[in-house]
Amino acid sequence: MRAGRGVLEWFRRLNLERIYFVIHRLTGIYLVLYIFPRPYLVLLSGSWEEALRLDMTPIGKMLAIIFIFSILFHGINGLRIVLIELGLISGRPLRHPIKPIPALRANKLHLTLIVATIVLTVVGMVVGSYLVLYGKEHLLVGP
Amino acid sequence: MKHDLLIIGSGIAGLRAALQAAYTAKIDIAILSKVQVMRSHSVSAEGGMSAVLYPDKNNDSLELHAYDTVKGSDYLADQDAVELLVQMAPIEVRFLERIGVPWSRLPDGRMYQRAFGGMSVPRTTFAADKTGFFIMSTLYQNILRFDNIKQYHEHFVTKLIIENGEFKGVTALDLKTGELKFFLAKAAIIATGGAGRLYRFTTTAHSTTGEMLGFALRSGLALKDMEFVQWHPTALVPSGILVSEAARGEGGYLVNKHGERFMKRYAPQKMELAPRDIVSRAILTEIAEGRGFVHEESGMGYVGLDLRHLGEGVLNQKIPFITELAHKYVGVDPLEELIPVRPAVHYTMGGIHVDTYGRVLAPDGSWVRGLWAAGEAAAVSVHGANRLGSNSLSECSVWGRLTGEAAAKYAMEAPTPATDERYIKAAQGEESRIFDKLLHKETGGISVYELRGRLQDAMEQHFGPFRQESTMKEGIPKLLKIREDFANVRVEDGGRVYNQNLKDALELDGMIDAALAVAYGALARQESRGAHYRLDYPRRDDESWLKHTVAFFNGGQIQLSYIPVRITKWTKFEERKY
Amino acid sequence: MPALTVKVKRFDGKKSWWQEYKVDIKSRKISVLDVLVKIKEEQDPTLAIRYSCRMAICGSCGMVINGVPRLACQTLLAEIKDDTITVEPMWNHRVIKDLVVDTEPNFEKLRKVKPYIIRDLKEIYESDMEIGQKPEELEKYYNFAYCIECGLCMAACPILATNDRFLGPMALNAAYRWSADSRDRGWEERAKIIDAEDGVWPCHLAYTCSAVCPRGVDPGFSIQLLKASLIRRAKRVL
């Protein structure tokens, strides 16, 4: 029996890491919803080219851009998480501080990774969106 | 509910007793606490636990510790109990170390000991400046190891049931559900702590109300030395939050508004590390004579605690909590400014009358079979008229262990208590008393909190650190009036679940009786000794008053009797000069 | 000083509602707990709040103040900029009455990780030895021993909102603190307990636990250290 607001709890904006957590979850769900149906899409459309034509539509392009953002963020953040969970970049805990401060600012390495994630994502997004919107047809369709 | 052993109160003494009892015997133990078990006021203890751990390294000895304690108590302590304390304290410190308390350490792995008020040699083992918290936390997590310990969080004990000089059980109000539960047991240990909240300005938590002392009086037990109430010299103004003696132990100074270290006029040798009652009276004298600062909002006078010369290293390593408190609650940076401090009620040397091993004694001196008391709630008397800092944690742990072991052995051998008709009737009577009479009051009547405020103000005004006959004689009728007015108290919250209003009312009921014991004892004692200081009798009178005050109810009124102090080695009663 | 408005989310066992109180205060250097106790004593004695020490060491007064889980006694009015305070009970916990919640599940989870020195029991209870510990060894777990078991981390954790079998930051922090203590020999036992579906793994680094901890314990960090120790199959915790 759950005592609380369930899934809505995820959406509290209490600290930066929490926001990353939520975006990670949302992009994860989006990736599943985007990638899984694709083989069926091909099947439904009849051929690979037909399916890709759907991708050329404005909605298709928008969904593709969101897909690029999702896969970049989810991947880079995921790498960050793996590095932390392996204990490779954690550093030492702070000596008992006078004022309680969030873990984020306690550890320089941690902070660097947080920033790196968002920076790399943004850079990748810019490149990817450009390609999607203005790239030559054959880049996506193939020879 | 039936258990073998009940532990009433879950501070350091209570939890230590539970641990010892659970290890000694496979009996069924229940801990009853009116707050959640790990939230007892013992967590605020900051300074440390005194013990002669490394006698050869410090030039220390058990005898020296005992002498310091006896002298500090103004010779009122029972010397055989003090000898037991100093003997067992190092054993307890090592035990706590083995169960995981994070004592602060020297580079070679030994425990670090610091100087403390009244101790001639540094022998206070500490864990930064949160010793009580760490010990409580460790003890609490350790009782989770034993399945035979059951915790009853937020169960407020309302009555002790004692028949024929034998302990039978208690009734307790379960706050969560509002039911009154009846606990039948073979043995019990009372470890409910002191009664700081009898006064307005105190370092204690909201829960340190001492109502169990009042309930003990009602069950026919006796309270010993209640008039000795210790004022801790350094408490933050205006909240009353404690600034540990450790600040002075690490080298802090006390200065008046002229910047003078005034302690040199009151205790030239020990200065700021003189025993607490001397320092408290010194500060209050400075304030009364106009050499103190005045707090704008509350109007309270205070002096300054100067930690500026200690440097950041010491402040962050040894006393970080004090630094945090100064920042948070007063908005002061201890590296730059003075911390405003003033004496506040801190400890009750008095308590339930017990013998050297913690067995509860009735007013006639006989043992109430199956009942023990430990910690601040008991008066063994190890602290006599004044407690030295860091001796209380030692006392709690030592007597926690002794009573836990003794009670466990007793419970193993005692027969299962029979569910006698009389006990059920007593419990039911209690239930009707509480629910019918207290809850269903007509409109009109006094608010619990207003009456409590009157009690606290009366105690502060008439039975403060400086006492005299005329003011005390005015105070007693006030207390008696409060006792009368209690019959008109109105409990506004009519609900069953988590009715704090009802609990506060029951607390007040016990508090009034405990306060009366303090008042009568103080009026009767015509001398000044330790924490009990009288302007009309400023000298210590060993000829007539080297005895303990025993207070008990006789026909609804408090009656006092006296018993001698037990003396073993220290027969020369020196004057307390530091 | 203007009057303060305090909005409290109340619950009486059947229904919950928001109640507003107006309080006159003289100074902003008091805590939210002081204000709530004032309301309780002067205006509405039916308001239920847990509190005891008023100095942020007992852990009783955990609640959500203006949307952030805090200890009421540690939140000074000076920190709150406007004149309205919104108070509700801790998230993720069943409410008993008003601001009092059921913290039993937290203590049960704490018990599961065996938060005590695991070593020969006879040695602990019957001998009189001093085990000894170097200052560096103390530093390793010291910060994590500051946990006052207030439950704010459990209230802030998003995982607990959807999975209440998750051990949670309070219990996992204790698992680390005891395993990292040089006197303890119980890492193998505890590793088995936390290396479970509802042990350490549901944690996905939202780090809100560390953000709200009133004593700066950083349980998020200790959980990652536990994960690292499990992954690397360390003999002693990292």
Image (cartoon, coloured by chain):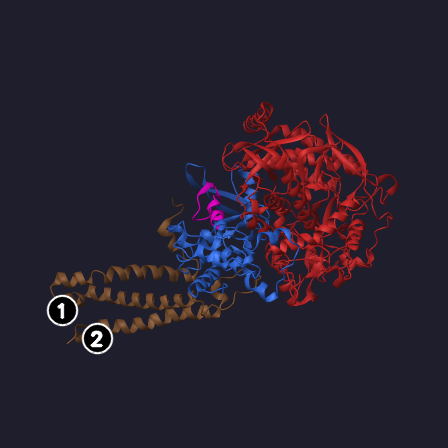
Chain colours: A brown, B red, C blue
Which of these two is toward me, B303 or C211? C211
Return the mark for residue A75.
none
Question: Percent position (x, y) of residue B357?
Answer: 72, 42
Do dots 1 and 2 share one subunit? yes
Is residue B242 visible to the viewer in this orientation of the structure?
yes
C134 over B74 or under it: above or below: below
Which of these two is toward me, B548 or C87? B548
Q: Which residue is mark 1?
A: A49
Left or right of C174 in this view: B135 = right
Q: Amino acid at mark 2?
A: Gly
Tell me the SS state at disc 2.
Answer: loop
Left or right of B433 in this view: A113 = left
C104 in magenta: yes
Return the mark for residue A135.
2
Question: Percent position (x, y) of residue B298?
Answer: 66, 49
Label 2 chain ID? A
Is residue B511 visible to the viewer in this orientation of the structure?
no
